[in-house]
Image (spheres, grey):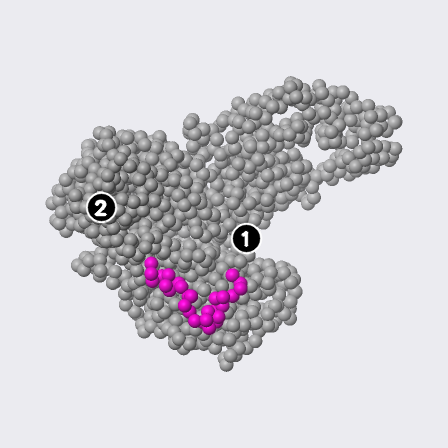
């Protein structure tokens, strides 16, 4: 989309760089916008639990569900924000909840590893979405709009803060060969400059498209020398030297990326105890992929990448990994087996390296799951639910071992302190030193924000 | 947040006060203090709402009445002050003290007593306020009449503007620069032929690649896609037919007026445009335009909001593509800047949701007529031949012998034959069952088929009498079976498509409608909830014998106005193939083309209670209701013989066919043709003719036959749960469209020669395609957020000339590329750069980067690989990871050497190579592509396997010319990649690199070729 205002912005950039040439422009892009407030955190790792893990089976214990299991929920429990009707019945959790760590935070047995880092978790139990549908909620979670067509959170962070490492992109998605509902738009830059869109790094095979040099280094260097001479002449004789120079400069960056990206993606030299901690050598293929990506996430933030997102692998041809409309027990367990250990390892590893203070680990799906089901059985599942569900943040100045907000006795509706995605976005940006009302980009005739016209910084969550 | 509000209402249990006193002493002070600043005549009337009179709140603002007396929960004012809806918080900054909210809530609960009747006589009604604003907004350049110039030329207008700025055109471009420029601008390909004919422009305009290139431009504007994206990325049925239709149209220079008519209302045109060579009905393809973009599955009956979101995309595309107006901004409120009201938006929604959005056959009418007529003749001849063959009566003794040997087979026609001795008792039972069935059947009324619509030759030629033979298309049998009376899409050939489209369920009389249905090979039905653009309630039949299926009236909720059902074969099912897994037996990598899909409909009844019609057992009438012989076997023989005789004499009665079908199934009637016999020849000829029928070509389009104009509920504040008035179809008021009610009239209104936007918008697009930037730099927005024209007189002159010359794209293009303005070089002076850095005055031709497709296509051309074949189904792009559930399979690395326009445009995962160079978002109309500069582009050109494969292939081709030396070869490479001769220093530079790459060896030439692909000059032209 090439719009009027986008072009204006380009013009502004052009003017800013007119005296100093391309170098200044590049520098500006790296530096981002000036910080609005003191940053607590420098990086975000977003563990995206695609499909919607059940809140009443993970972080929001509801003993009433067991007690009333099989009883019809009744008209009063039906809401637009979940797949519901009066004849559905309550279903208790197949997993036991226990209080963990010194804080006594409730975590179910579904997550034995995450339970061990409970004192780091800042759990929000009162997330409210807009529609109980994957595509819309995914886009809302990522772009702040159910229709998308706006930059992703990661793109905003990259745009706002720039990158600390010019050989690496500012926003990386560690993908597991699965495009979430809502499509690649979840990771796009939309009207922000294209350099802020996510670079996809795959678990399987070659991590990044076209990153492995086709030529031996000496040959490639020779090609680049030839091209540098040839292109310099072309640029000099061109009416639009700046664009050509930009394209030329890209070759230098690309050349460096060829070595920087694979070396970060390569986890072979990580010590055995670290590999073990993440589960990199698991016999389960999907766990292996996820663990590899989690470990890469740490390496990427160490190298200065601002925003890293890890997606879940899809293992059974389901609509999305955590979307257990049936076989809740079996497949939530499978998802937990794939992700639990690595997420916990990531938090511990960052903590041990002193990086957790400056890195926010965000764990969130796009929705929760209904505390009710059409019929209780061993193969029963839970359906879509956005009327009070759980997510957590760890590190980066968030208060550990706490919960915020409540759902009702059945986990069916938010009961206190409702938060929406915009509030979470505002708070994340705040911790990164950005005022969500001031991080704007002129587009479509107005100053666009990640949080649109919403959002509040939830100071109650902060240490 | 809702909970909080409910709690508040519970708290608000104030005691009652005397109405008037209560209002004046309590309510009014609060209104004055808190609301009047923005909502009173003395100050401001924001959002059209005034609270300084009773009629003010009764009428309400833009969002409708603000108070529902007695019902605080339904009152916008209470919602607003309670800050429950994030889009409606009043006062916006700070919530009122709780006590005041409670007070106003209680006031409303008491019925909102307000004694201020008639106190304001000078009220400005909301409608009037909008009217005043509307009139103001009409004062805008793009809504004013196009100027009239008596004479003019492109260069004249451009020169004049330059002169005024003290600038002048750059000197003419060199022939080689111009050749490369013309080639890319007109065909999107590098010059294929290095010779430079004097009529090069004509050569290019006549090249079929012109149509491909301009079709691709237009495809950006209409958000072309081959799939529907969202969760499953289902194929968009027939989108490639639309793409090919565009290519033909641009090559044949079909007027833009005709294209516009076809896009908006091709299905309604009194005269359909038939392409004789392609044998297609072009007009019917046009409305595929509406179907482009993302489609969400499911329907608003399940989740409110689904069709509303889709409709938004359609309105956005329509208004941007043809009017460069952002009507979609008026979904939630009157447009903030333009003369477009919220009412306008919903009037268009009503217009666009009036027709059925469904699949049409685009084969030229009568394409199969000759074959069909011949098949009917042959079928009749076969029937007559069989009648002779079958006329011989059965003898009772032989029947008895057969029956003894085949007791199992007898069950097929029911118990009676198995126990012939019990005839009298059975006759009584039969009589009883028959009477019971007849009584039951009284509740079922034959449906009036007046408003039902059929589509496709299958049903058009598939209505059969009872007992019509279905000729076997393979094997030894002559007849596959005898068809019951009804419609059978496969009666002549299962390649013929058929669809029966029901009127809205609630319009069909009775609470239920039931159909007797059979089908196979993905023939089935699709329930269409209103404008659920991709409903998944799809069923595929696998029963050869008809079975009754009932469809009950649906509960209409969430703004859905109707539910219909379409009974269709695969080719006419708009959601076939559905998402993976829904069509049993269809492999994930089967994109659903060319199915021998069939459907039989043998009865349609309506009824008010459940259940389905019962078999009245006509088949046994001849057995039981007779005075024939008492010997059971005699009687049976008489019964059977009568049935066969009836059929042979073409006097078949109800039930006869079943007898014959049973005889056939049990090989009791001869059903093989003697080799060389007349029957054998007839069957062979039938099969031959059937094989000449092509599978149907179908496209998602529109069908407005027998529909009622829709009225679309206005969504108050855009909220799909708050519906306001029902809006009737109309066009935009700013274009005097309030009395236009049909899509055809809409199209014609846009084509009025004095229409201020249509021609301007299109001419501006073409200008941009030729010069890189439009005269209006924002091609999709001629409104207040868009740019103003750099040369308004030129734009108007071109638009008028364009109309005068019959809306001809080629004439317009020729006019532009023949101008001196186009033919100047890209040399820019310091003065020009200083005074007009953006080159809005066209003082030189800009340096332009190739579009994504042109980069990939150039690689194919230069390496000698391009397959210039036109048209066809989309080719899957090369992928490194597949997802079979979403049909994201990989295609060949080289895309079969075809041009990029033929690669599958998947919303979920578009071709990565093209995305790398700014292929636009496939969901949204894009009038102007981004041109970005990012390192991943360098990585693609350096390391992508496709680029390297092309370099290798090209080097191989070069090595085949062994009678040449290094320098000649190098010069040839310069010509092919950059369209020019190298300078001496360049020859030296590249030959030196060749040396370093390994001298005169295949691998060194490959490296050199690859370096050419990475030269900036390769992906730019000027």
Circle 2 Cα neighbour tier, 10 Å, few/some/many (<14 / 14–19 / ≥20): some
Closest to the observer, B560 or A183: A183
Any mark on residue B302, and which? 1
Q: Which residues fall within the magenta stretch?
A: A258-285
Placement of the C terminus of chain B among the 4 image quadrants: top left
Q: Is residue B913 above or below residue B267?
A: below
Is A282 covered by the magenta stretch? Answer: yes
**Residue A215 appears in the rendering:** yes
Q: Earlier in the sequence, mark 1 or mark 2?
A: 1
Q: Residue at x 33, y 72 (%)?
A: A39
Whole-percent x and y of residue B448? Answer: 61, 34
Whole-percent x and y of residue A395? Answer: 42, 73
As drawn, the residue found furthest toward the bottom would be A102
Q: Residue at x 24, y 48 (%)?
A: B995
Closest to the observer, B450 or B885: B885
Alpha carbon separation for disc pair 1 and 2 = 68 Å
Closest to the observer, A310 or A423: A310
Closest to the observer, B340 or B858: B858
Q: Within the image, what quadrant is residue B99 found in?
A: bottom left
Left/right of residue A118 with respect to residue B655 in the rendered view? left
Left/right of residue B716 with respect to residue B129 in the rendered view? right
Report the chain holding disc 1. B
**Marker count (numbered):** 2
Whole-percent x and y of residue A328? Answer: 59, 62
Q: Is residue B176 above or below residue A415?
A: above
Residue position marked by numbered label 2 in the rendering: B991
Q: Residue at x 42, y 75 (%)?
A: A351
**Residue B4 appears in the rendering:** no
Q: Secondary structure at mark 1?
A: loop
């Amino acid at each position: 989309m090439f719009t009027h205002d986008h072009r204006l912005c380009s013009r502004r950039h052009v003017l800013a760089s007119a005296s100093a040439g391309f170098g200044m422009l590049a520098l500006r892009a790296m530096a981002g916008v000036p910080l609005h407030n003191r940053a607590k955190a420098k990086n975000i790792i977003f563990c995206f639990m695609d499909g919607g893990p059940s809140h009443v089976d993970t972080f929001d214990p509801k003993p009433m569900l067991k007690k009333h299991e099989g009883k019809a929920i009744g008209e009063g429990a039906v809401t637009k924000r979940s797949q519901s009707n009066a004849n559905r019945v309550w279903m208790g959790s197949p997993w036991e909840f226990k209080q963990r760590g010194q804080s006594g935070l409730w975590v179910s047995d579904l997550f034995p590893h995450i339970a061990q880092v409970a004192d780091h978790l800042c759990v929000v139990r009162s997330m409210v979405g807009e529609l109980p549908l994957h595509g819309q909620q995914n886009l809302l979670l990522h772009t702040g709009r159910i229709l998308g067509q706006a930059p992703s959170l990661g793109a905003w962070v990259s745009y706002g803060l720039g990158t600390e490492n010019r050989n690496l992109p500012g926003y990386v998605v560690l993908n597991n060969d699965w495009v979430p509902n809502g499509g690649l738009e979840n990771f796009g830059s939309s009207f922000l400059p294209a350099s802020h869109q996510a670079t996809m790094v795959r678990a399987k095979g070659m991590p990044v498209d076209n990153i492995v040099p086709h030529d031996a280094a000496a040959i490639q260097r020779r090609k680049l020398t030839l091209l540098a001479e040839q292109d310099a002449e072309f640029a000099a004789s061109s009416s639009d030297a700046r664009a050509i120079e930009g394209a030329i400069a890209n070759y230098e960056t690309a050349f460096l990326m060829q070595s920087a990206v694979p070396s970060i993606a390569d986890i072979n030299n990580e010590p055995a105890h670290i590999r073990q901690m993440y589960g990199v050598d698991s016999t389960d293929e999907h766990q292996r992929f996820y663990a590899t990506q989690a470990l890469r996430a740490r390496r990427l933030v160490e190298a200065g990448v601002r925003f890293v997102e890890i997606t879940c692998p899809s293992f059974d041809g389901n609509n999305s990994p955590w979307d257990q409309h049936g076989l809740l027990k079996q497949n939530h367990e499978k998802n937990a087996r794939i992700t639990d250990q690595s997420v916990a390892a990531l938090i511990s590893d960052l903590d041990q390296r002193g990086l957790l203070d400056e890195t926010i680990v965000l764990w969130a799906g796009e929705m929760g799951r209904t505390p009710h089901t059409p019929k209780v059985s061993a193969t029963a599942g839970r359906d879509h639910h956005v009327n009070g569900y759980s997510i957590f943040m760890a590190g980066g100045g968030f208060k550990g071992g706490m919960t915020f907000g409540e759902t009702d006795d059945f986990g069916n509706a938010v009961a206190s302190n409702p938060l929406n995605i915009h509030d979470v976005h505002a708070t994340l940006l705040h911790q990164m030193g950005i005022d969500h009302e001031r991080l704007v980009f002129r587009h479509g005739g107005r100053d666009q924000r990640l949080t649109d016209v919403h959002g509040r910084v939830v100071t109650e969550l902060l240490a | 947040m809702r909970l909080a509000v409910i709690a508040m209402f519970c708290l608000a249990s104030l005691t009652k006060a005397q109405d008037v006193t209560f209002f004046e002493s309590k309510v009014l002070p609060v209104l004055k203090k808190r609301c009047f600043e923005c909502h009173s005549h003395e100050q401001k009337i924001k959002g059209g709402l005034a609270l300084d009179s009773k009629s003010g709140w009764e009428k309400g603002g833009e969002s409708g009445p603000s108070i529902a007396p007695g019902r605080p929960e339904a009152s916008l004012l209470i919602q607003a002050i309670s800050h429950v809806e994030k889009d409606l918080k009043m006062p916006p900054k700070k919530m009122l003290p709780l006590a005041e909210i409670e007070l106003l809530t209680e006031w409303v609960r008491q019925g909102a007593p307000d004694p201020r009747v008639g106190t304001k006589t000078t009220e400005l009604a909301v409608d009037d306020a909008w009217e005043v604003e509307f009139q103001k907004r009409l004062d805008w350049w793009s809504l004013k009449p196009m100027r009239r110039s008596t004479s003019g030329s492109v260069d004249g207008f451009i020169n004049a503007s330059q002169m005024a700025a003290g600038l002048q055109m750059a000197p003419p471009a060199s022939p080689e620069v111009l050749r490369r420029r013309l080639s890319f601008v007109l065909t999107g390909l590098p010059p294929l032929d290095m010779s430079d004919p004097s009529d090069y422009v004509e050569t290019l305009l006549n090249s079929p690649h012109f149509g491909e290139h301009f079709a691709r431009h237009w495809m950006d504007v209409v958000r072309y896609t081959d799939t529907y994206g969202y969760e499953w990325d289902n194929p968009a049925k027939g989108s490639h037919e639309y793409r090919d239709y565009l290519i033909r149209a641009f090559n044949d220079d079909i007027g833009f007026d005709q294209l516009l008519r076809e896009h908006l209302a091709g299905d309604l045109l009194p005269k359909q445009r038939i392409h004789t060579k392609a044998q297609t009905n072009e007009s019917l393809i046009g409305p595929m335009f509406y179907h482009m973009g993302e489609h969400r599955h499911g329907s608003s009956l399940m989740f409110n909001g689904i069709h509303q979101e889709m409709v938004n995309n359609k309105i956005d595309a329509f208004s941007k593509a043809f009017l460069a107006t952002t009507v979609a901004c008026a979904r939630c409120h009157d447009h903030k800047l333009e003369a477009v009201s919220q009412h306008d938006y919903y009037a268009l929604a009503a217009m666009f949701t009036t027709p059925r959005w469904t699949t049409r056959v685009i084969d030229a009418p009568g394409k199969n007529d000759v074959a069909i007529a011949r098949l009917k003749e042959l079928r009749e001849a076969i029937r007559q031949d069989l009648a002779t063959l079958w006329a011989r009566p059965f003898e009772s003794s032989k029947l008895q012998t057969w029956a003894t040997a085949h007791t199992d087979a007898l069950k097929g026609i029911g118990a009676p034959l198995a126990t012939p001795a019990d005839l009298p008792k059975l006759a009584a039972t039969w009589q009883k069952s028959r009477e019971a069935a007849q009584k039951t059947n009284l509740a079922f009324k034959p449906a009036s088929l007046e408003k039902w619509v059929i589509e496709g030759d299958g049903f058009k030629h598939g209505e059969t009498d009872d007992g019509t033979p279905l000729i076997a298309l393979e094997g030894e049998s002559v007849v596959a079976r005898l068809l019951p009376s009804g419609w059978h899409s496969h009666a002549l050939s299962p390649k013929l498509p058929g669809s029966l489209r029901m009127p809205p369920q609630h319009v069909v009389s009775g609470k239920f409608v039931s159909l007797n249905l059979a089908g196979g090979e993905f023939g089935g039905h699709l329930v269409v909830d209103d404008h659920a653009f991709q409903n998944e309630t799809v069923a595929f039949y696998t029963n050869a014998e008809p079975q009754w299926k009932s469809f009950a009236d649906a509960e209409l909720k969430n703004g859905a106005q109707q539910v219909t059902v379409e009974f269709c074969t695969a080719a006419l099912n708009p959601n076939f193939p559905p998402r993976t897994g829904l069509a049993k037996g269809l492999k994930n990598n089967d994109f659903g083309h060319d199915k021998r899909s069939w459907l039989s409909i043998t009865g349609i009844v309506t009824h008010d209670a459940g259940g389905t019609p019962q078999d009245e057992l006509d088949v046994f009438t001849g057995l039981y209701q007779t005075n024939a012989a008492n010997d059971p076997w005699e009687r049976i023989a008489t019964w059977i013989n009568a049935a066969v005789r009836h059929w042979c004499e073409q006097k078949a009665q109800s039930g006869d066919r079943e007898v014959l079908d049973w005889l056939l199934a049990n090989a009791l009637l001869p059903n093989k043709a003697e080799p060389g016999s007349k029957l054998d020849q007839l069957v062979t000829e039938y099969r031959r003719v059937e094989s000449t029928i092509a599978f149907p070509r179908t496209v998602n389009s529109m069908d407005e036959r027998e529909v009622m104009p829709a009225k679309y509920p206005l969504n108050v504040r855009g909220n799909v749960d708050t519906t306001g008035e029902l809006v009737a179809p109309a066009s935009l008021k700013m274009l005097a469209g309030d009395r236009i009610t049909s899509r055809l009239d809409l199209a014609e209104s846009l084509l009025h020669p004095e229409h201020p936007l249509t021609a301007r918008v299109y001419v501006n697009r073409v200008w941009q395609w030729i010069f890189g930037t439009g005269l209006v730099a924002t091609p999709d927005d001629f409104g207040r957020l868009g740019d103003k024209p750099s040369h308004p007189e030129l734009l108007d002159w071109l638009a008028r000339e364009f109309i005068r010359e019959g809306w001809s794209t080629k004439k317009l293009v020729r006019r532009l590329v023949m101008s001196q303005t186009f033919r100047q070089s890209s040399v820019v002076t310091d003065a020009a750069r200083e005074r007009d850095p953006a080159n809005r005055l066209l003082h030189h031709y800009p340096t332009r980067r190739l579009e994504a497709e042109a980069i990939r296509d150039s690689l194919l051309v230069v390496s000698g690989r391009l397959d210039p074949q036109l048209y066809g189904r989309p080719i899957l792009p090369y992928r490194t990871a597949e997802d079979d559930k979403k049909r994201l399979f990989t295609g060949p690395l080289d895309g079969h050497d075809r041009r990029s326009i033929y690669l599958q445009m998947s919303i979920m995962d578009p071709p990565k190579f093209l995305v790398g160079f700014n292929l636009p978002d496939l969901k949204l109309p894009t009038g102007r592509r981004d041109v970005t500069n990012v390192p991943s582009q360098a990585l693609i050109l350096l390391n992508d396997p496709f680029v390297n494969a092309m370099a290798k292939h090209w080097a191989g081709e070069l090595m085949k010319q062994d009678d040449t030396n290094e320098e000649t070869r190098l010069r040839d490479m310069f010509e092919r990649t950059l369209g020019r001769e190298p300078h001496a220093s360049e020859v030296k530079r590249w030959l030196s690199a060749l040396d370093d790459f390994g001298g005169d060896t295949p691998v060194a030439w490959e490296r050199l070729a690859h370096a050419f692909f990475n030269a900036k000059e390769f992906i730019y032209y000027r």
